[in-house]
Amino acid sequence: MTKPLSAPLDVGFDYTRSTGPTLGRFLSDLRRRKVTGIRGSDGRVHVPPLEYDPVTAERLTEFVDVASTGVVRGWSWIPEPLEAQPLDRPFAWALIQLDGADTSLLHAVDAGSPDRMSTGARVRVRWRADRVGAITDIECFELSDEPSDEPVEADDVTMVTTPVHLHYTHSASPTEDPFLRGLMDGRLIAQRCPACEKVYFPPRPACPTDGVPTTDQIELSDRGTITTFCVVNVPFLGQRIPPPYVSAYVLLDGADIPFLHLLLGVAPEDVRMGMRVEAVWKPREEWGPTMQNIDHFRPSGEPDAPFDSYSQHL
Amino acid sequence: MRDVAVVGFAQTPCVRETDGTTNGVEMLVPIFHEVLGSLGLTKSDIGFWCSGSSDYLAGRAFSFVSAVDAIGAFPPIMESHVEMDAAWALYEAWVKLLCGEVDTALVYGFGKSSAGQLRRVMAMQLDPYVVTPLWPDSLGLAGIQARMGIEAGLWDERAMASVAAQSRAAALSNPLAQLSGSFEVDDLLAAEYVVDPLRRHDCAPITDGAATIVLAAGDRARELCERPAWITGFEHRVDSPSFGTRDLTTSPSAVAAGKAAGADGIEVAELHAPFTHQEILLRQALGLGDDVVVNPSGGVLAGNPMFAAGLARIGEAARRVHDGTASKVLGHATSGPLLQQNLVCVMEGRA
């Protein structure tokens, strides 16, 4: 068997989070080129500040200013930095105990070479020029015993935005693969469960009723019946057609599971359950391994299907 | 309180990359058939299903819902999921059985790590305000912990390489292992650092795979299995997520879980240690002496299917009770960064 189709899948989202009073103070102060810790129940100063004591779970409120210089308590060396890490040249990850703190902060040290790194090394903050109130306002640490730049005035922050971008290779399943390849040729390939004989379009890796792979392929026509539908009246980001329009569940002839597609060529008020429809394909040169090869469905003009013919597929 | 035992276990081969989807169905269908078949059960005999997996690993929403297709969930089943290693799903199922709600449960975990960049995906489990925005990678963090232990004199690079050599040698008898073979410690130490002080052999490989366990209570367990692995202690504990506040050269949560579960008199232990130094750390934390056989399967250094590897440790340990080679065994699972969360399952065979 050939390897199933696969494609790059990039997932990205900007997480926005409210900071609350404790982290809000810490992040606002970073923006001011200041590092602030918090005193724990046992008197230890935690940097970054914790909202609750890790041992007693007591709410912590006593902020403590600490220095922007400190000492390396542990480190590792990254010879090939990964995407979005603080530095794009080799660097050290380090746990850094700032002067005045009792716990350590994780950050990058721009040491140039692992030979220059050591536990006990003195480091100081290198502040970013454009600070927004985020841990990345510390660009990195550098090997130095000199104080960092002086604090400046800045407004408080109450929200923090963290962009997350992850990259995957998304693989089609062995049953989706012939379905997707079929679409490239304008063919609609379904799979039949060998146990219950239900026909799945699009196919699934295993029959959800029987838990066995659906091994029998069958080709379906591009005609079917509307089982149910809704009229979209609400505009949203990325909408391709101006509302109102109709999204409908189409049960292809011979299939047991309907799928969602677009219905055009009929006024929304005239659409009904049981309406017979046919696919309107995009021009062949636009076809790819996607259901979007079917631009939309339209009424075929056949008499409506009787309710009993699709009542088990709603 | 009812007695509950592990009565069945199956896992896929550990491989670097599968062709399957990230919802795990292709990996799960064969091991469900294997484990149910070996017990003479069908899906309708299972009272409760519970799984562990991660959407960040899969790169898609609700991958665990798609995975339910592998069960054939009709008529509807009782089912639950944890976004953690499936060892914690096993804990949930165990509680369900203890409560007497059901007599049998099937637990599974799956992960296709090859789909994404595992070192980056693991940053998503860190503090979202002050740690994740820096994108610390899992190897970079483990390297800090390894060096702290080296500098504290708790282990050294030779001891770490020796753990890797033992893992791969043990895995020679595990046909499902991803990495196995005979290696000299000196040869391993001759390799370059991947993330100083870690070499390739210090880090568990990137693995696609799945595992499943069947639990049964009381007489049902005795009917299904000649020598059930009775769970006599099952505990999990957690340390602060703020790893700058804790002593990384030990794991208080592992110590506490081991103590609570009763880790005395263990003959065989399967430890979930994705880095060589963590195996040494866990042996110390759980008080496992030199007489304890650790990771006879090769452990996760020989194959590390994310979200299934901890469950597989418990399954591998239970297998030593099932086949009569041991009477008291321990399965361990970890979750979170740098051994932050630890789970210990102690199992015993009875004459």
Image (cartoon, helix red, strand yellow):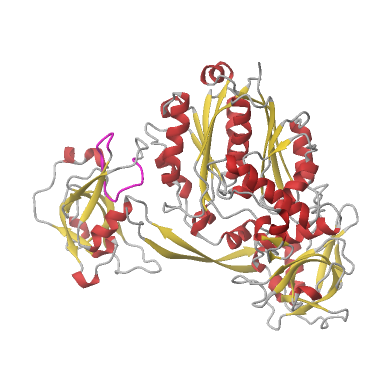
Residue A1 x %, y %: 32, 52
Name of the residue lying farthest toward the left: A302
In the rendered image, residue A44, in percent from the top left (x then y), is placed at: 89, 57
Residue at 71% across, 36% down: B293
Range drawn in magenta: A194-207
Q: Determine whether, in the image, residue A176 is placed left or right of residue B323.
A: left
Could you say where residue A11 lies in the image, as x and y percent from the top left? 49, 64
A78 left or right, relative to B319: right
Residue beneath the point at 77% across and 52% down: B159
Q: Could you say where residue B51 lies in the image, as x and y percent from the top left?
A: 53, 40
Is residue A292 at all visible to an observer of this figure?
A: yes
- Residue B217 in magenta stretch: no
Q: In which quarter of the image is the N terminus of chain B?
A: top right
In front of the other: A15 or A79: A79
Place residue A84 in its image quadrant.
Answer: bottom right
Residue A134 in view here: no
Residue found at x 66% / y 78%: A89
